[in-house]
Amino acid sequence: MKDVIISIKNFEQTDRGLEEVVEFVTEGQYEFSQEKALIAYEEVEFTSSGGCFTTYTVENDTIMMTRVGVVNMQMLFQEGKRHYFVHETPYGKISMGVDTSGIINRLNYDGGYLEIRCTVEFINYAVYSNVYKINIKEKKDDN
Protein backbone atom coordinates (compact mmCIF):
# COMPACT_ATOMS: atom_id res chain seq x y z
CA MET A 1 0.00 0.00 0.00
CA LYS A 2 1.19 3.52 -0.70
CA ASP A 3 0.56 6.75 1.17
CA VAL A 4 -1.94 9.04 -0.54
CA ILE A 5 -3.99 12.19 -0.06
CA ILE A 6 -7.72 11.44 -0.15
CA SER A 7 -10.24 14.17 -0.88
CA ILE A 8 -13.84 13.24 -0.08
CA LYS A 9 -16.93 15.29 -0.81
CA ASN A 10 -20.30 13.91 0.31
CA PHE A 11 -23.49 15.54 -0.95
CA GLU A 12 -26.45 14.49 1.18
CA GLN A 13 -30.05 15.43 0.50
CA THR A 14 -32.83 14.50 2.93
CA ASP A 15 -36.36 13.50 1.99
CA ARG A 16 -37.40 17.01 3.10
CA GLY A 17 -35.16 18.64 0.49
CA LEU A 18 -32.46 19.80 2.93
CA GLU A 19 -28.98 19.49 1.47
CA GLU A 20 -25.70 19.17 3.33
CA VAL A 21 -22.21 18.98 1.86
CA VAL A 22 -19.34 17.55 3.89
CA GLU A 23 -15.88 17.85 2.41
CA PHE A 24 -12.54 16.87 3.89
CA VAL A 25 -9.02 15.98 2.88
CA THR A 26 -7.04 13.35 4.76
CA GLU A 27 -4.02 11.12 4.48
CA GLY A 28 -4.58 7.44 3.86
CA GLN A 29 -3.38 4.36 2.05
CA TYR A 30 -4.15 3.09 -1.44
CA GLU A 31 -3.47 -0.11 -3.32
CA PHE A 32 -4.42 -1.00 -6.89
CA SER A 33 -4.16 -4.22 -8.84
CA GLN A 34 -5.93 -5.54 -11.92
CA GLU A 35 -8.44 -7.33 -9.68
CA LYS A 36 -9.28 -4.61 -7.15
CA ALA A 37 -8.50 -1.30 -5.47
CA LEU A 38 -8.33 -0.61 -1.75
CA ILE A 39 -8.71 2.84 -0.15
CA ALA A 40 -8.18 3.18 3.61
CA TYR A 41 -8.22 6.15 6.01
CA GLU A 42 -9.10 7.32 9.50
CA GLU A 43 -12.33 9.35 9.65
CA VAL A 44 -11.86 12.90 10.85
CA GLU A 45 -13.60 14.00 14.04
CA PHE A 46 -16.00 16.54 12.48
CA THR A 47 -17.73 13.92 10.32
CA SER A 48 -20.59 11.79 11.61
CA SER A 49 -18.21 8.80 11.52
CA GLY A 50 -15.30 10.47 13.36
CA GLY A 51 -13.32 7.91 15.33
CA CYS A 52 -13.71 5.19 12.71
CA PHE A 53 -11.34 3.51 10.30
CA THR A 54 -12.92 3.39 6.82
CA THR A 55 -12.00 1.20 3.86
CA TYR A 56 -13.41 1.02 0.35
CA THR A 57 -12.77 -2.22 -1.51
CA VAL A 58 -13.51 -1.78 -5.22
CA GLU A 59 -13.79 -5.00 -7.19
CA ASN A 60 -15.40 -5.35 -10.63
CA ASP A 61 -18.85 -3.71 -10.36
CA THR A 62 -19.07 -3.71 -6.55
CA ILE A 63 -17.78 -1.44 -3.81
CA MET A 64 -17.72 -2.50 -0.16
CA MET A 65 -17.41 0.33 2.36
CA THR A 66 -16.44 -0.88 5.83
CA ARG A 67 -16.33 1.28 8.96
CA VAL A 68 -14.88 0.03 12.23
CA GLY A 69 -14.70 1.99 15.47
CA VAL A 70 -17.31 4.23 17.10
CA VAL A 71 -19.77 2.90 14.51
CA ASN A 72 -19.50 -0.40 12.67
CA MET A 73 -21.02 -1.28 9.32
CA GLN A 74 -20.45 -2.76 5.89
CA MET A 75 -22.30 -1.14 2.98
CA LEU A 76 -22.32 -2.91 -0.39
CA PHE A 77 -22.76 -0.65 -3.41
CA GLN A 78 -23.77 -2.31 -6.68
CA GLU A 79 -25.35 -0.24 -9.44
CA GLY A 80 -29.07 -0.91 -9.88
CA LYS A 81 -29.29 -3.06 -6.73
CA ARG A 82 -30.47 -2.62 -3.15
CA HIS A 83 -28.53 -4.19 -0.30
CA TYR A 84 -29.29 -4.25 3.42
CA PHE A 85 -26.83 -3.83 6.28
CA VAL A 86 -26.69 -3.32 10.05
CA HIS A 87 -25.39 0.03 11.32
CA GLU A 88 -24.01 -0.44 14.85
CA THR A 89 -23.79 2.72 16.96
CA PRO A 90 -23.03 3.30 20.65
CA TYR A 91 -26.82 3.57 21.09
CA GLY A 92 -27.78 0.30 19.40
CA LYS A 93 -28.14 -1.41 16.04
CA ILE A 94 -30.17 -0.08 13.11
CA SER A 95 -31.18 -2.09 10.04
CA MET A 96 -30.72 -0.01 6.92
CA GLY A 97 -30.64 -0.36 3.16
CA VAL A 98 -28.68 1.24 0.36
CA ASP A 99 -29.95 1.50 -3.22
CA THR A 100 -27.12 2.38 -5.63
CA SER A 101 -28.15 4.32 -8.73
CA GLY A 102 -24.69 4.93 -10.19
CA ILE A 103 -20.97 4.26 -9.88
CA ILE A 104 -18.13 6.00 -11.71
CA ASN A 105 -14.81 4.18 -11.30
CA ARG A 106 -11.76 5.91 -12.76
CA LEU A 107 -9.17 4.40 -10.41
CA ASN A 108 -5.76 3.33 -11.69
CA TYR A 109 -2.28 2.58 -10.33
CA ASP A 110 -1.64 6.27 -9.56
CA GLY A 111 -4.95 6.99 -7.79
CA GLY A 112 -7.92 8.50 -9.57
CA TYR A 113 -11.58 9.18 -8.98
CA LEU A 114 -14.49 7.18 -7.55
CA GLU A 115 -18.11 8.34 -7.37
CA ILE A 116 -21.04 6.55 -5.73
CA ARG A 117 -24.66 7.71 -6.10
CA CYS A 118 -27.08 6.06 -3.70
CA THR A 119 -30.16 6.39 -1.50
CA VAL A 120 -29.96 5.27 2.12
CA GLU A 121 -33.12 4.04 3.78
CA PHE A 122 -34.54 2.81 7.07
CA ILE A 123 -36.89 -0.15 6.58
CA ASN A 124 -37.90 0.75 2.99
CA TYR A 125 -38.29 4.47 3.75
CA ALA A 126 -35.81 6.68 1.86
CA VAL A 127 -34.12 9.01 4.30
CA TYR A 128 -31.46 10.67 2.22
CA SER A 129 -29.69 10.53 -1.10
CA ASN A 130 -25.90 10.60 -1.18
CA VAL A 131 -23.22 11.29 -3.74
CA TYR A 132 -19.73 10.34 -2.56
CA LYS A 133 -16.95 11.88 -4.66
CA ILE A 134 -13.50 10.51 -3.80
CA ASN A 135 -10.21 11.68 -5.33
CA ILE A 136 -6.92 9.87 -4.69
CA LYS A 137 -3.47 11.45 -5.26
CA GLU A 138 -0.07 10.06 -4.36
CA LYS A 139 1.41 11.76 -1.32
CA LYS A 140 4.53 13.74 -2.18
CA ASP A 141 7.53 13.81 0.17
CA ASP A 142 8.35 17.23 1.62
CA ASN A 143 12.04 16.71 0.91
Image (tube, rainbow, N blue to C red):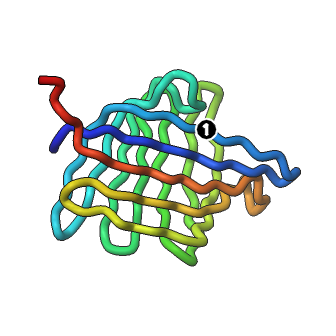
Q: Residue furthest bottom?
A: 80
Q: Is residue 101 above or below residue 7?
A: below
Q: Residue at x 20, y 69 (%)?
A: 35
Using the rendered view, name the quadrant where residue 88 is placed: top right
The image shows residue 80 at horizontal and vertical percentages of 57, 77
The percent coordinates of residue 98 (x first, y second) are 60, 60
Relative to 21, is 132 on the left or the right?
left
Residue at image mark 1: 22
Rendered position, 18 above or below 121: above
Residue at 53% x, 32% y is 49
Tell me which corner region of the image, top left, top right, bottom left or bottom right, holds residue 110. bottom left
Q: Is 52 positioned to the left or the right of 102 in the image?
A: left
Q: Residues within 10 Å of mark 1 (few under 14, many from 20)?
A: few
- Identity of the residue furthest to the right in this view: 16
Image point (43%, 42%), residue name: 7
Amino acid marked by disc 1: Val
Q: Nearer the viewer, residue 81 or 141?
A: 141
Q: Say what secondary structure mark 1 lies in.
A: strand
Q: Is residue 69 above or below residue 105?
A: above
Q: Position of residue 10 (x, y in %)?
A: 58, 46
- Quadrant of the image for the N terminus? top left
- Residue at far front of view: 143
Query: Residue visible at 29% across and 46% down?
Result: 137
Task: Give the quadrant of the C terminus.
Answer: top left
Residue 74 versus residue 141: which sits nearer the camera? 141
- What is the tally of numbered marks visible in this picture? 1
Residue 52 quadrant: top left
Residue 17, placed above or below residue 108:
above
